[in-house]
Image (spheres, grey):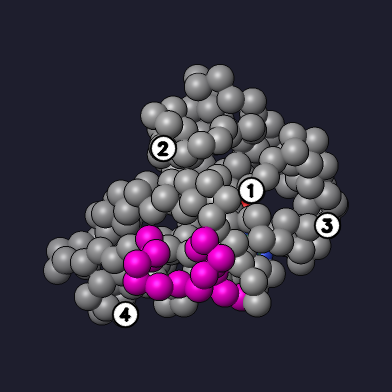
Amino acid sequence: MLISGSGSNLQALMDRVEDGTIPGRIVRVISNKADAYGLTRAQEAGIDTLVIDHKAYDSREAFDAALIAAIDADEADLVCLAGFMRVLTGGFVRHYVGRLINVHPSLLPAFPGLKVQQKAIDAGVRFSGCTVHFVEEEVDAGPIIAQAVVPILPDDDASALAGRILKQEHRIYPLAVKLFAEGRLSTRNRTVLVDGQPWEPETAL
Ligand code: 3YE
């Protein structure tokens, strides 16, 4: 699990592992920021942590190589980005093809990138939400696994909207990880498969 911040999605995943919903365990939490509160959450739950500070590396490739070495030492089956704020190299993405996922606080492909809650408000859209997706080299453009919709209310500011979206992230990210842990989630030719079948209303998260 890769984080940079408070780790609220990490907490949601820890909770679903703890209560048996997700048949797996979080082998390690890696942060590129030493002061990320998510590291404290992990330590309190007895999960191994590691700080790999991107500023200690000369290049994006060198940082990503350090990440790969640490992740592969743990033999993790799935790599989850959760509030991890670094763009990963093509080499990193290819190394974990089919087992690298992210959660993003908009209804992709609308509003990729940063400060997306404010962008949704500024655009005047009536609904936003969140997206769990497989990670490809192009940021926020990988195959979509799950989405949830929330309304944008007249008095919303970015923070109020972000809170409403986060609640849904905390619901759908664990659902996607559960499916993966059960061996039911995969991707082929940029299509997401559940139980080996393309998306259908019956299997949609
Ligand atoms: N990398 C690839 N594809 C993806 N990383 C994330 C998703 C994703 C990915 O789909 N290849 C913000 C990145 C956006 C940004 O520009 N970060 C800066 C550093 C800013 C900082 O350290 O605070 C940078 O140079 O990387 C995860 C979400 C990425 C968020």
Is disc 4 surrounded by few (<14), some (14 to 19) or many (20+) residues within 10 Å?
few
Residue placed at 26% from the left, 79% from the top? 124
Which is more foreground, mark 2 or mark 1?
A: 2
Q: Is residue 110 above or below residue 82?
A: below
According to the image, label 2 marks what residue? 21
According to the image, label 4 marks what residue? 123
Rendering coords of residue 199 (x, y %): 45, 72
Whole-angstrom CA distance, mark 1 to mark 4, is: 33 Å
Amino acid type at mark 3:
Glu
Whole-angstrom CA distance, mark 2 to mark 4, is: 37 Å
Of labels 3 and 1, earlier in sequence is: 3
Whole-angstrom CA distance, mark 4 to mark 3, is: 35 Å
The residue range painted magenta reads: 190-205
Whole-angstrom CA distance, mark 3 to mark 2, is: 36 Å
Amino acid type at mark 2:
Thr
In the displayed structure, does residue 1 sit left or right of residue 66?
Answer: left
According to the image, label 3 marks what residue? 61
For residue 79, the mark is: 1
Residue placed at 47% from the left, 39% from the top? 22
Which is more foreground, mark 3 or mark 2?
A: 2
Query: Is 197 part of what is drawn in magenta?
Result: yes
Is disc 2 placed on a helix, strand or loop? loop
Rendering coords of residue 200 (x, y %): 40, 73
Of labels 2 and 1, earlier in sequence is: 2
For residue 142, the mark is: none
Amino acid type at mark 1:
Val
Q: Is residue 107 above or below residue 175?
A: below
Is disc 1 placed on a helix, strand or loop? strand
Q: Is residue 82 above or below residue 139?
A: above
Residue placed at 25% from the left, 64% from the top? 150
The residue closer to the viewer here, 174 or 4, is 174
